[in-house]
Image: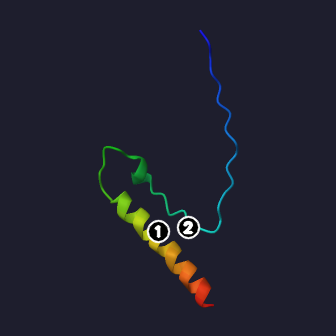
Amino acid sequence: MTKFFYKRKNGRTNHTTFGGVLYSSDFDTSNPRGNIAERIARDTRFDEQCKKNLSIR
């Protein structure tokens, strides 16, 4: 049997965007508490607001 090994390049961390906050409940699939999609959208809006503030300055 042939084994395949996939090489991945080390990704660079993008410090220009907010990655969000991880909660322990994010990893609990049996507990649907919290809306992850809403938090992702909120973090994206935060990034956009920061870009607007930077362009105004």
At a point 54% along the width and 83% down the height, the residue shown is 52
Quarter of the picture containing the C terminus is bottom right
At a point 68% along the width and 33% down the height, the residue shown is 7
Residue 43, label in figure: 1
x and y percentages locating residue 1 in the rendered image: 59, 9
When asked about the image quadrant of residue 38, the answer is bottom left
Q: Residues within 10 Å of mark 1 (few under 14, many from 20)?
A: some
Q: Who is closer to the viewer here, 45 or 34?
A: 45
Judged from the image, the secondary structure of the residue bearing numbered disc 1 is helix
Q: Who is closer to the viewer here, 11 or 55?
A: 55
Judged from the image, the secondary structure of the residue bearing numbered disc 2 is loop
Residue 51, label in figure: none
4 left or right, relative to 38: right
Q: Amino acid at mark 2?
A: Phe
Q: Earlier along the polypeptide chain: callout 2 or callout 1?
A: 2
x and y percentages locating residue 45 in the rendered image: 45, 73
Q: In this view, which residue lies farthest toward the bottom?
A: 57
At a point 63% along the width and 69% down the height, the residue shown is 16
39 versus 57 height, above or below: above
Query: Are the residues flagged by discs 2 and 1 in contact, CB closer than 8 Å?
Result: yes
At a point 56% along the width and 85% down the height, the residue shown is 53
